[in-house]
Amino acid sequence: MTYTTIELLGTIFFGLAVIHTFMVGRILQWSHHFPKDSLWSNVLHLLAEIEAVFAIWASLFMVIYIALEGWGAAVAYQNSLNFVEPFFIFAIMVVCSTRPILAAARQGILIVSTTIQKIFRTPQILTDLFVVLLVGPLSGSFITEPAAMTVTAFMLNSMLQKESSKLIYALIAVLFVNVSIGGALTPFAAPPILMVAGKWNWDFAFIITHFGWKSALAVFINALFLVLIFRREFAQNCIPLSEVERRLAGSQAEIPGPVTWIHLVFLAGIVVTGHYQNAFLGIFLLFLGVASVTQRYQDSLRLKESLLVSMFLGGIIQFGAFQKWWLAPLLGGMSDLLLFKGAVGLTAITDNAALTYLGSQVEGLSDSNKYALVAGAIAGGGLTIIANAPNAAGYSILSHKFPGGIKPLNLLIAALAPTAIAIFCLWIF
């Protein structure tokens, strides 16, 4: 392995950022030792915001970059980066968190859930949760994974009424894993597949036959096992979607059909132009105007939360190019099975889209090598918040359900079982 000083520093700072994500809970506890709103309390609270971690370390790294390489080199490096994904997630998260989109999603899920209940006589709350965790993640293959994560997380947030540490970690782990593999039915929705599909000539037929049905099976098994294993906890801590609808109907103005359809058209426009930054940002800006006109049927737009998630992903992208010196040789020297296992493990500390992108730069990979790399990357996408880009959006929506903040190690442990199901389906079949 050969590397430059700046590449080594980029890897060191990236490692420090990863370590920092595992310490946010402890840092939040430290902040409580200082008077509220004091300087140190506020600083530690900022450091405990997991969405800010990578942005903070990326900023410190860029200061060193400028000192070592000069302002011109730093500007040239920034211009070489592609920030389409953070901007897209910002736009799609704001749109998908609006009341008309969430109401349409709940009504669609209710139709599917009610049909299943009538046919199989299944309990309402468990059926609702099963359908949410099945249909929500699989919809990511068509509306993109960030959109699926946002809508699904909001529905789970509205259903979960009481805090239960054991339950919420199991729930968010299955959500993360299912969204990571649920987008694998098409070549354009899951970031780790999108990164390589064009270069390796993977079309829709290839994706659905090699990844799609296996991923759908894993999503089904994970959702089913979760509701069966935690059926008592769900019954005690959650309410069905019909009750969510009833409560909202009593406190919110009824949304006219045209307003819902206009929002769906804007959502479709952003999804279709998702790879063209200027196009979807233009559509998004026009949507903000529509949102202000339809303010009566809106909740507050989640601009701050969406910006934090975008900042988190932008920080990861800042470090991506500096991991090639060690990742590319490592991936290029593995057998199929070792590559699959390595991809699962590396995804936990490296965004899975970045991992497959770097793998696509390795010359001479066989077809089986390529499958092993991508399958491992999507299978491990639920192990940590940084493993898959949409995870940050899900965390932002559900973070208030975690007393004292989410503990990354607990998430990793909770995600082992659903990840094992994904590994079995993607590798054994």
Image (cartoon, grey):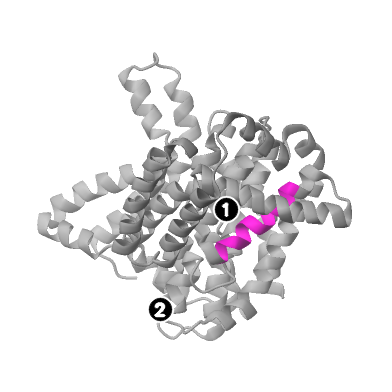
- Identify the secondary structure beneath mark 2: loop
Residue 400 visible in the shown view: yes
Q: Nearer the viewer, residue 37 or 143?
A: 143
* Residue depicted at x 51% and y 55%: 261
Identity, as a three-letter code, of the amino acid under mark 1: Leu
Q: Nearer the viewer, residue 223 or 25?
A: 223
x, y (%) of residue 242?
72, 41
- Identify the secondary structure beneath mark 1: loop
Residue 234: quarter of image: top right
**Cα gap from disc 1 to disc 2, whole angstroms:** 25 Å
Region rendered in magenta: 128-141
Residue 362 is marked as 2
Where does label 1 land, which residue? 383
Q: Is residue 282 above or below residue 186?
A: above
Residue 271: quarter of image: bottom left
Is residue 164 one of those drawn in magenta? no
On screen, residue 165 versus residue 280, left or right, reads right
Is residue 138 one of those drawn in magenta? yes
Mark 2 crowdedness (10 Å alpha carbons): few <14, some 14-19, many ≥20: some
Residue with the most extreme right position: 121
* Residue depicted at x 32% and y 57%: 281
